[in-house]
Image (cartoon, grey):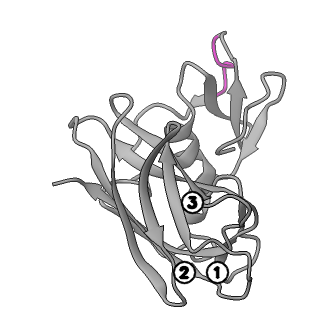
């Protein structure tokens, strides 16, 4: 769901954990989000009224979002951090989350209600087993380089950067990790994510 284009001719069935991510990732103007007959449905391009028996999942609820700030996750299997992984990660096992290509993206929760930027900290570790792996990686936001990190055999302890807001209210921002040099692959593990208001 994150990082992929939604097909307007497809209804997406989400589990309860994915609903919280969908609320932030997909604007209400782009898709309806509702519960019907025991199923959570994301309907891209939905422009008519919801079905009579449907419950609008975009309405405020008493359930606390797992992405409220400050947010911290160690990316354990079943945790909310796994829902924030975009393209380019191998996250199917219960162990580490590792990159599997030239780029990898992660979405981070932000809250534009206060108008304040957020500080994002990504804990990254070089897997150290590939000659062609990137030693220097860059982070891109909206097509612009926003930060960088030098990897060693130890962890790149914290890749820190401030992330600007794009719209009011809670939403997700995509960070894209790329090697600083062409012809190499990432070969990194994402160990943890921390997000808090900047300042």
- Residue under pointer 1: 96
Seen from the viewer's position, the closer of residues 69 and 90 is 90
Seen from the viewer's position, the closer of residues 2 and 183 is 183
Closest to the camera, between mark 1 and mark 2, is 2
Q: Residue furthest right?
A: 9
Secondary structure that dominates the magenta span: loop
Number of residues whose C-alpha sits closer than 10 Å to that of mark 2, classed few (under 14), some (14–19) or many (20 or more): many
Instruction: Choose top left, top right, bottom left or bottom right for residue 72.
Output: bottom left
Is 74 on the left or on the right of 94, as rendered? left
Helix, strand or loop at mark 2: strand
* Structural distance between the alpha carbons of marks 1 and 2: 10 Å
Seen from the viewer's position, the closer of residues 117 and 125 is 125
Magenta segment boundaries in residue numbering: 49-54
Instruction: Choose top left, top right, bottom left or bottom right for residue 121.
Output: bottom left
| Mark 1 or 2, nearer chain start | 1
**Residue 78 among those drawn in magenta:** no
Which of the numbered marks, if any, corresponds to residue 125?
Answer: 2
Q: Is 35 drawn above or below residue 88 in the view shown?
A: above
Residue appearing at x 61%, y 76% in the figure: 189
Q: Give how far across and how far down residue 198 sits, in percent.
A: 22, 53
- Residue under pointer 3: 180
Q: Is 151 drawn above or below residue 100 in the view shown?
A: below
* Structural distance between the alpha carbons of marks 2 and 3: 16 Å
Residue appearing at x 67%, y 25% in the figure: 53
Q: Give how far across and how far down residue 47 sits, in percent.
A: 65, 11
Residue appearing at x 22%, y 41% in the figure: 116
* Mark 1–mark 2 CB contact (< 8 Å): yes
């Amino acid at each position: 769901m994150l990082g992929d284009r939604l097909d307007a001719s497809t209804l997406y069935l989400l589990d309860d954990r994915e609903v919280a991510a969908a609320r932030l990732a997909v604007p209400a103007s782009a898709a309806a989000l509702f519960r019907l007959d025991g199923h959570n449905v994301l309907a891209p391009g939905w422009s008519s009224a919801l079905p009579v028996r449907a419950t609008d999942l975009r309405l405020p609820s008493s359930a606390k979002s797992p992405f409220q700030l400050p947010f911290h996750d160690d990316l354990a299997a079943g945790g909310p951090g796994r829902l924030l992984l975009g393209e380019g990660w191998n996250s199917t096992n219960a162990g580490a989350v590792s990159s599997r290509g030239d780029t990898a993206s992660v979405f981070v929760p932000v809250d534009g209600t206060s108008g304040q930027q957020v500080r994002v900290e990504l804990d990254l570790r070089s897997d150290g087993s590939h000659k062609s792996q990137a030693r220097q990686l860059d982070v891109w936001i909206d097509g612009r380089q926003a930060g960088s990190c030098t990897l060693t055999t130890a962890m790149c302890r914290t890749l820190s950067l401030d992330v600007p807001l794009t719209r009011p209210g809670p939403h997700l921002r995509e960070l894209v990790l790329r090697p600083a040099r062409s012809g190499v692959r990432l070969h990194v593990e994402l160990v943890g994510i921390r997000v808090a208001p900047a300042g």
